[in-house]
Amino acid sequence: MTDHLMKMRQDAETIFRSGISAVQPEAAIKRHCRLDDARLIIGENGFDLSGFQNIFAVGAGKAGAPMAKAVEDILGDRITDGIVVVKYDHVCKTGKVRLMEAGHPIPDENGQTGANAVMEMAGQASSSDLVICLISGGGSALLPLPAIGLTLKDKQDTAQLLLDCGATIHEVNTIRKHISMIKGGRLAEAAFPAPVITLILSDVVGDNLDVIASGPTVPDSGTFRDCLTILNKYDISDKLPRAVKEFIHSGAQGKITDTPKKGNPVFEKTTTSIVGSNMDAIREAEKKAKELGYNVLVLSSMIQGETKTVACVHTAIAKEIRKTGRPLPPPACILSGGETTVTIRGGGKGGRNQEFALAAAMDLAGEENILVMSGGTDGTDGPTDAAGAFADTDTMKRASALEMNPASFLNNNDSYHFFEKTNDLVITGPTNTNVMDLRIVLVV
């Protein structure tokens, strides 16, 4: 690897870590929330805590542990009890809020136990109590509470099918909400008539409140008929567990009550605030890139689509910069966020960020001094221990020296083993936050 590319790799990692620093849950919550005597101030809203007998903290997500700690730091002994479900190993020391570790992205029995505990705690709240709900990315998988007549295995198989077919997170969560007893506003329904304050670290394109963690405390905009549309779009209806297929069809026929919608009384005393998002990470990454001397172009925090296609769009912009100096001259940094999808066709190991990097590396063959880094802000890309991967204009040369065929790895969705061999994996460990992905393209 050339000295230029090595320096660019170091810069990309510095930019990436700066972005993550902006969305650390504790700092994000404390920027938005403070206690003024007996009033909890959240943004421009104030809540008088003196009239509440109990304050319960519940929630779920990869960032749940530090979010819980931040709320404990702010409220102290005012918290009566709490339970938050987090991904395995995504923990920190908390006081009254108990942490339960569970499976992600495929739900497991610990998650079901945790979801039951969350619902029970919310259900015991009265009108003189306050429920604070802490939600972050991963909450959907971490709160698996199957609808009546369905099993955890049904939900596991459905989740895997949706992940493999390339459905967007919006589509995945639309179906998750409708086969659940806690998602799609059902948690707010359980807590009613207690007031509910929800603090959210968003991992969803567009920050749609009813999509983040499948919106357990907000009105659901989707319907059972929307579920059928999604199943037909990906032609997976016949691959669903039989009980799930029958449940969704019954719902579409009006035989099962749909999720609570806007205007439902259960939402009259609910308040929701987003305390951190992908754009927050991008803004901080932009600031750091400028400090390092790069001209910066922020594409969007809402990038979606098939990973391989999105990667080639990014590399096309990079090549244009090298050739014509447009849309900005080198040294240039292109930043984007969002969440792409991978349609699984092979039996390999990887994630959307590693697949993005591999597709980019193949498209950059023959170019000079372009580097790509794509990583998940949670430190985990798909079912791997990598956050993502680096790719540059020498990646294909390194692969050739190792006698590897990049196309075969890409076709087998085996980007992890490709980058493991080229020593290009990005390993951060759990970051205890999650605001989707951050992609960095450097051109000098």
Image: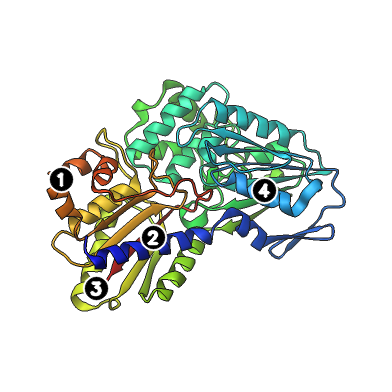
> Of callouts 2 and 1, which one flags the residue occurring earlier in the amino acid sequence?
2
Mark closer to the observer (1, 3): 1
Q: Quadrant of residue 231?
A: top left
The residue under the point 35% across, 26% down is: 239
Q: Residues within 10 Å of mark 4 (few under 14, many from 20)?
A: many
The quadrant of the image that shows the N terminus is: bottom left
Q: CA distance from mark 4 to mark 2?
A: 27 Å
Mark closer to the observer (3, 4): 4
Q: Amino acid at mark 4?
A: Lys
Mark 3 and mark 2 in contact (Cβ < 8 Å)?
Answer: no
Mark 4 and mark 1 in contact (Cβ < 8 Å)?
Answer: no
The residue under the point 61% across, 31% down is: 114
> Of callouts 4 and 2, which one flags the residue occurring earlier in the amino acid sequence?
2
Q: Residues within 10 Å of mark 2 (few under 14, many from 20)?
A: some
Mark closer to the observer (2, 3): 2
Q: Which residue is mark 2?
A: 13
Q: Amino acid at mark 1?
A: Leu
Q: Secondary structure at mark 1?
A: loop
Q: Which is nearer the eye, 413 or 401?
A: 401
Q: Residue 393: where, in percent of width, then height?
A: 20, 61
> Of callouts 1 and 3, which one flags the residue occurring earlier in the amino acid sequence?
3
> Of callouts 3 and 4, which one flags the residue occurring earlier in the amino acid sequence?
4
Q: Which residue is mark 4?
A: 69
Q: Which residue is mark 1?
A: 402
Q: Residues within 10 Å of mark 3 (few under 14, many from 20)?
A: many
Q: Which is nearer the eye, 345 or 211?
A: 345
The quadrant of the image that shows the C terminus is: bottom left
Q: Which residue is mark 3?
A: 321
Q: Is residue 116 visible?
A: yes
Q: CA distance from mark 3 to mark 4?
A: 45 Å
Q: Residue 249: where, in percent of width, then height?
A: 46, 29
